[in-house]
Image: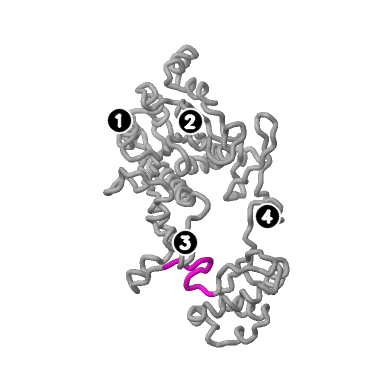
Amino acid sequence: MTKSASAGPLAGIKVLELGTLIAGPFCARMLAEFGADVIKIESPDGGDPIRQWRVLKDGTSLWWSVQARNKKSLTLNLKDPRGQQIAKKLALEADIIIENYRPGVLEKWSLGYEQLKAENPATIMVRLSGFGQTGPLKDQPGFGAIGESMGGMRYVSGFPDRPPLRIGISIGDSVAAMHGVMGAMMALRHRDATGGRWNGKTGDEQIAGQGQMVDVALYEAVFNMMESLVPEYDYAGVVRERTGGALPGIVPSNTYTTGDGENIVIAGNGDAIFKRLMLAMGRDDLANDGQLARNDGRVPRTLEIDEAIQAWCATQTIDSAMAILQAADVPVGKIYSVRDMMTDPQFLARKMFEQHTFADGTPIKLPAITPKLSETPGETKWLGPALGEHTDDVLKTLGYDEAGIAELRRDGVV
């Protein structure tokens, strides 16, 4: 790997992370993976709660090793004016600030967007919250589950005869985080195009590009993924409902069960693909049925088509079904568990797992970084840090000496 590649495309970009759990930290994580210098502020009293979520090793979450990789952990009591002052110094020096507190919290600590912008016009602040910074719900707590529900995802997830289901990951938070990354990159591009980083001066000597606030609401990030939901309802009065494993209005695209009890996804919804699928199944009658030649003709006969595919799958093992359909150039896939992923040739060929080691020598695999950039790929430089691991180093860059840091630590500020 070349020196420029190992530095990452965001080398030199300073990011301050203010927040906990998923949306804000995942947003900052992606920037850290591609070379940004991310300082994560954590409460001295236990730090980010995600440190204790899910499966633990020696009291710390395995998730933490991924969610906080490449970040520097600075403990800071933001309820203490001295802690607020330290955070403000870091914020004014940062290229990007990422926060996911409830609207108004940062303003109480003199760390709000308008307050920082008054000193540094180039301030870029990514604000992730349940409902955004405005509107009647802005002060309400809004977790990913609420965003998924209000944004429309939960309503269309599951089977029509049962209550809506949730996807087994925090998808609402993650989608919001990715919107935050996109917004941050667009804001950074605009800042650089209008004058660049603030030179730290005021008045006539001030040089600064135009910063901005990136306002990401979880429910809106989910809503943005909902395809043609709005125009279908507005024009035709259609409310998209739950359809189980099928893709509504696109036939066939569903989940089927093979004779050995495995689940397989078959997407035969392209017109030419549908014909190849039917021929591979030995259903020449359906392959040559003129009414089924196009998707609009197949939709009214969805049940018939799905029953035919399921009947064929029931006569096959997962391996035989995959082989036959791949040979026919039909999009098909087994539904993978993590066990399947870890041994799959495609995952391995793409180097989708990284081997690392904890401080005590215990080996651990992490998911590799995506997307894959040809010249400046992302890199895991270190696993999620210990609580406050970088506190002294960060404070020294702000001019604090050993005695001053000891005093802050004694008073519970760090």
What is the C-alpha distance between the residues marked 1 and 3? 57 Å
24 to 204, vertically: above or below: below
241 to 286, vertically: above or below: above
Rendering coords of residue 243 (x, y %): 48, 68
Earlier residue among tags 4 and 1: 1
Per the image, the residue denoted by label 2 is: 47
Q: Residue furthest left?
A: 136
Amino acid type of disc 4?
A: Asp
Per the image, the residue denoted by label 3 is: 157
The magenta-colored residue range is: 241-251
What is the C-alpha distance between the residues marked 4 and 1? 62 Å
Q: Nearer the viewer, mark 4 or mark 1?
A: 4
Dot 2: what SS?
Answer: loop
Q: Residue at x 64, y 78 (%)?
A: 276
Rendering coords of residue 63 (x, y %): 57, 40
Q: Along the line of sight, which residue is nearer the eye, 123 or 287?
A: 287
